[in-house]
Image: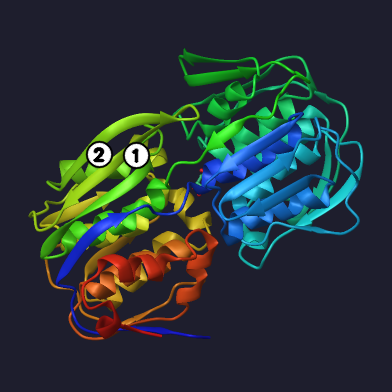
Amino acid sequence: MRKLKIKGKLKRVEGVLRVPSDKSISHRAVILGAIASGETVVHNWLEAADTKSTLRIVRSLGTKAHYSKGLLRIKGRNYTFEEPQDILNAGNSGTTARLILGVLSTQPFFSVLTGDRSLRERPMLRVVSPLREMGAYIEGRERGNKLPAGIKGGKLKAISFFNKKSSAQVKSALLLAGIKAEGITEVTEPLLSRDHTERMLKFFGADLIEIPSEKGRTVKVKPTDQLVGREIFCPADPSSAAFFCALTLLAPKGEIILKDVLINPTRDGFYRKIREMGGEITYENEREFSGEPVADIKVIAGKRLKAVKIKPYEIPTLIDEIPILAVIMALAEGISEVRGAAELRVKESDRIKAIVENLKTMGVRVEELEDGFLIEGGRKLRGGYIRTYGDHRIAMAFTVAGLLAEGETVIDNPLCVEISYPRFFEDLKEVVDNFTKLLTF
Ligand code: S3P
């Protein structure tokens, strides 16, 4: 496998960058486009390994779609799909697998869903159990907790579900199934998880209400066959922008503008936390894209950062940014803490383990906890051999760390960035002074 060597330290980051589009929104645009009637046109659709898995699956279910240079056109099937002729493969993508399980549960045919080695180890019962309760037949390895799984859907009945883990994937799967169920499907979550499915369903004409409740927040969806295809403009992904935000904050000099970034409050916890640490970040030119708030984010280098504590209730708003946040914490003065993040253990890799192990390799004092970690920050990073475990966010976070470390850093599998950010290294080249001297493949 091709490895990446990073040698020498970053001096300056400068430029204007539009990072690739939001992964969560791009998945949902494909799925909603396919279940609606009429045409959906998606501008700036994210073309990356995960979203291509979603597109491949809806095509295998008979959906016609055309993609060229950022523009995706989907001919909606009004929630009537064809039985697939072969096993559906979600690749590395948890969002694809869980949301598609919701869709397949409504269809009267048999299908089989699998994924790559990492996805086949990730828990599915969190979505399989409530979908079974709605009436879908789903069986799989480990009593349905692991892929591959076989699905035979059909007539569903609505349920009221308490989404204890505040998982957006579970909530979305149930809302997608609820569109075709008899009765009103309700999902309550103690902490509001990313709400793109709700926003997009409304945008497509669904009858959906969101109400605060004693236990958190409840969303209710009425069944409908009136979803209509729309034109969607995807914003840039705040999870991808976070790597460039961190790189700039931690560089000795420079300034970057990250264009068109999604700043939905269920997603921008990272940026709020960075401000609390003393980072200079501003939202400029705030506006809306297809029902989602967007801004250009300006980041200025060189400010001293101080340690921060992430509380369990803040986790859903920054869950995917924790690997890069940990790198920032390692360079901020004082002891930082992340708690209530046990979900990180079942992401594309065990991210708590990967973060702790790789930071230790770089000479950082860090303590592993069951649901997070403690980091003693403020000392220099030392280069070392980084194990990505094939996890895109670990690869990108530790490439940033490598650019800030003394000595040589090796990234074992840099190409796994294709999962969410295929042109990550090209974009780095755009904004990093001396890129070709610092990085070799
Ligand atoms: C996602 C939801 C989150 C997130 C994942 C994308 C989504 O996962 O970590 O990267 O698009 O719905 P959970 O639903 O498991 O919290």
Is residue 402 in view?
A: yes
Q: Nearer the viewer, residue 41 or 111?
A: 41
- Residue 428 in percent (x, y) is at 33, 68
Residue at 52% x, 47% y is 44
Amino acid carrying mark 2 in the image: Arg
Which disc, if any, is residue 272?
2
- Residue 79 in percent (x, y) is at 80, 32
Q: Is residue 64 left or right of residue 125?
A: right
Q: Secondary structure at mark 2?
A: helix
Count of marks placed on residues: 2
Instruction: Judge the density around disc 1: few (<14), some (14-19), many (≥20) Cα neighbours within 10 Å.
Output: some
Q: Is residue 155 left or right of residue 73?
A: right
Which disc, if any, is residue 268?
1
Q: Nearer the viewer, residue 263 or 367?
A: 263
- Residue 373 in percent (x, y) is at 31, 56
Is residue 341 in view?
A: no
Compared with residue 387, is residue 316 higher up or lower down, i.e. above or below? above
Q: CB at mark 2 closer than 8 A to ligand 1?
A: no
Amino acid carrying mark 1 in the image: Asp
Residue at 15% x, 46% y is 277
Instruction: Judge the density around disc 2: few (<14), some (14-19), many (≥20) Cα neighbours within 10 Å.
Output: some
Q: Secondary structure at mark 1?
A: loop
Q: Is residue 264 left or right of residue 38?
A: left
**Label 1, label 2: how many angstroms apart (C-alpha)?**
7 Å
Circles 1 and 2, Cβ within 8 Å, touching? The answer is yes
Which disc, if any, is residue 55?
none
